[in-house]
């Protein structure tokens, strides 16, 4: 898979908002300075996503599958565990690739 990197504040704020599509095996990797509990939301998204929460050791600590897009008042998607990276991919990617909590990402 190939992921875009969101490392600046502006890139992280914009994320995948307002995009029409994402390549089937594409994604966006959010990179943070420090590991801590993070909250994401799907405001102004146009398609559902799988959200993969990753700690500083690049180990998946949580997965939210098929998170629907949202317009208006949007619920928060919170990972209970501290993370340093968050990977957003198309809905269904996690299931198709048999990704599980405990797996490790390589990048």
Image (cartoon, grey):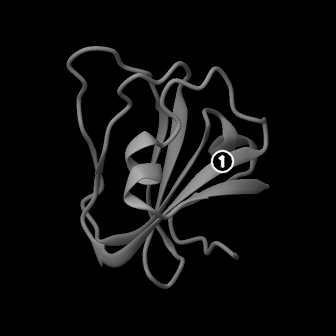
Report the residue marked by disc 1: 27
Towards the viewer: 96 or 14? 14
For the image shown, how many numbered marks are present on the structure?
A: 1
Q: Residue at x 70, y 33 (%)?
A: 22
Image quarter where the C terminus lies is bottom right
Q: Is residue 35 above or below residue 65?
A: below
Drawn side of residue 101 relative to residue 99, left or right: left
Q: Residues within 10 Å of mark 1 (few under 14, many from 20)?
A: many
Residue 40 percent location from the top left of the image: 33, 45
Q: Residue at x 48, y 30 (%)?
A: 17
Q: Is residue 50 left or right of residue 9?
A: right
Q: Is residue 20 above or below residue 38?
A: above
Question: Which quarter of the figure has residue 49?
Answer: top right
73 displayed left or right of 9: left
| Residue 25 left/right relative to 107 | right
Which residue is more in the foreground, 71 or 53? Answer: 71
Q: Is residue 46 above or below residue 62?
A: above
**Residue 39 location (% of width, % of height):** 27, 50
Instruction: State the residue lying farthest toward the top.
Output: 72
Is residue 99 visible to the viewer in this orientation of the structure? Answer: no
Work out whether residue 4 can be spotted.
yes
Image spot of residue 68 (x, y percent): 44, 23
**Would you place residue 71 above or below residue 33 in this image?**
above
Q: Residue at x 24, y 65 (%)?
A: 37
Position of the N terminus, as image quadrant, is bottom right
For image coordinates 24% across by 60% down, the residue present is 80
Locate residue 93, reporting x and y percent.
68, 41
Q: Secondary structure at mark 1?
A: strand
């Amino acid at each position: 898979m190939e992921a875009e990197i969101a490392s600046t504040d502006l890139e992280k704020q914009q994320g995948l908002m307002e995009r029409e599509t994402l390549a089937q095996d594409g994604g966006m990797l959010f990179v943070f300075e420090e590991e801590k509990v993070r909250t994401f939301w799907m405001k102004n998204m146009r398609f559902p996503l799988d959200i993969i929460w990753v700690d500083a050791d690049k180990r998946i600590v949580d997965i939210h599958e098929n998170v629907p897009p949202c317009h208006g008042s949007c619920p928060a998607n919170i990972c209970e565990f501290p993370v340093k990276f968050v990977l957003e991919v198309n809905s269904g990617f996690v299931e198709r690739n048999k990704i599980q909590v405990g797996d490790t990402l390589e990048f």
